[in-house]
Image: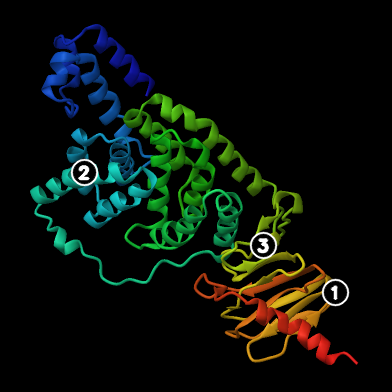
Amino acid sequence: MKKLMLTLAASLLTGTGAEAQERTSAAPRMAPPQMRELAPALALYTDEVLFADVWQRAQLSPRDRSIVTVTTLITNGRAAQLRGHTGRALDNGVKPTEITEIITHLAFYAGWPAAMSAVPEINAVFGQRGIDPATLAEAPIEPLPVDAASEARRAATVWDQVAPVAPPLAELTDTVLFGDLWRRPALAPRDRSLVTMVALIANGQAEQLPFHVNRAMDAGMSAAEVSEVLTHIAFYAGWPRAMSAVGVVRATLAERAQAATARPPGLTIQRHAETPAVAGPASNFTGTVHVTSRFQAEPTGRVAGGVVTFQPGARTNWHTHPRGQTLIVTAGQGWVQSEGGAVQQVGPGDVVVFAPGVRHWHGATPTQAMTHVAVAEAVDGISTTWLETVTDEQYGQGAVGRTAASP
């Protein structure tokens, strides 16, 4: 790199003289003739720095660089260069279906106008390449599985922070954005996270980067690749946007590195202070419910759970678990019920086991709060299937049962 920059500086000082022309003759010329006439220095940077150096760096594959570039151009509405880089993306191994899925994904992260503006440009490239859009129609494919524990944490955060202000936005975030779009198999999870990261940086929205950088690395991106995304995007979204993201990415990578090195072999300690309580979403609970100390087994395991506290009168919806569920009551008094059975009262030290697939609910009594540890196993990434609300009448059967059983 140092030798390249010294040679480049010498070439810039000589303008477009014979020495510069001779030196650049071996390198591919990507800058258009108009640029060479109007801004020869820019042309030299284009040829010698952007395409002869940055695009050749091994820290990011040509395919990934094309995804970064196309995503940036769509996000920032740079239609004039989109056709050329769409063709380059196809040459670098990005599938037509992946390109169309990038457009769909960016409608949510860059806005519908940006996505709609990209459609005719990319359609024109497909036409030139003989790619019939009709052949890209999707066959029915099962949605990608989700990590039940991490998805529950994300959903709880949305309902805690977004729902009080914009309930429809919270619902659409859960059902459409993460419940459908992120589970579409047309883009691999790693690539979808890459597209999202790039859109956020290109739009100058670095505050949402930590979540998506972690999601990208959990899906397989390396720290070196994340770093190289910042370098590449500086040329296509501008240095200010890339530099604004550096501090956020640095902090995120440092936190991941610290977490990895601080972990003793064969031992994991999840500190209570590092896992603040999140509110149980209104879509799955009635009343005030908070979840703390969430835990998730290693990738090879399926067990997940947390400590759940129900305020008086609060309870879950009806729900099932593919491998059943175990509750360990640690404080207060609660009610539990399986479908077809009577409501049962439980207290500290009681252990409740629901069989696989059995519809049930659990919560506090009307007058006392209840806390329990909940443990369940996932099948294909799903540990809980949430069903309808437990009505006041159904919940009231607990009080009726207590009264009827009283002497």
Image coordinates of residue 2 in percent, x first then y, are 38, 20
Q: Identify the secondary structure beneath mark 3.
A: strand
Residue designated by label 1: 348
* Residue 212 makes an appearance in the image: yes
Q: Identify the secondary structure beneath mark 1.
A: loop
Which numbered tag is attached to residue 86?
2
Q: Is residue 341 above or below residue 121?
A: below
Q: Nearer the viewer, residue 239 or 45?
A: 239
Q: Specify which label sits upstream in the sequence, 3 or 2.
A: 2
Residue designated by label 3: 295
Q: Is residue 184 above or below residue 354?
A: above
Q: Specify which label sits upstream in the sequence, 3 or 1.
A: 3
Q: Identify the secondary structure beneath mark 2.
A: helix
The amino acid beneath tag 2 is Thr
The amino acid beneath tag 3 is Phe
Q: Residues within 10 Å of mark 3 (few under 14, many from 20)?
A: some
Q: CA distance from mark 1 to mark 2?
A: 62 Å
Image coordinates of residue 108 in percent, x first then y, are 37, 49
Name the residue at the right extreme.
407
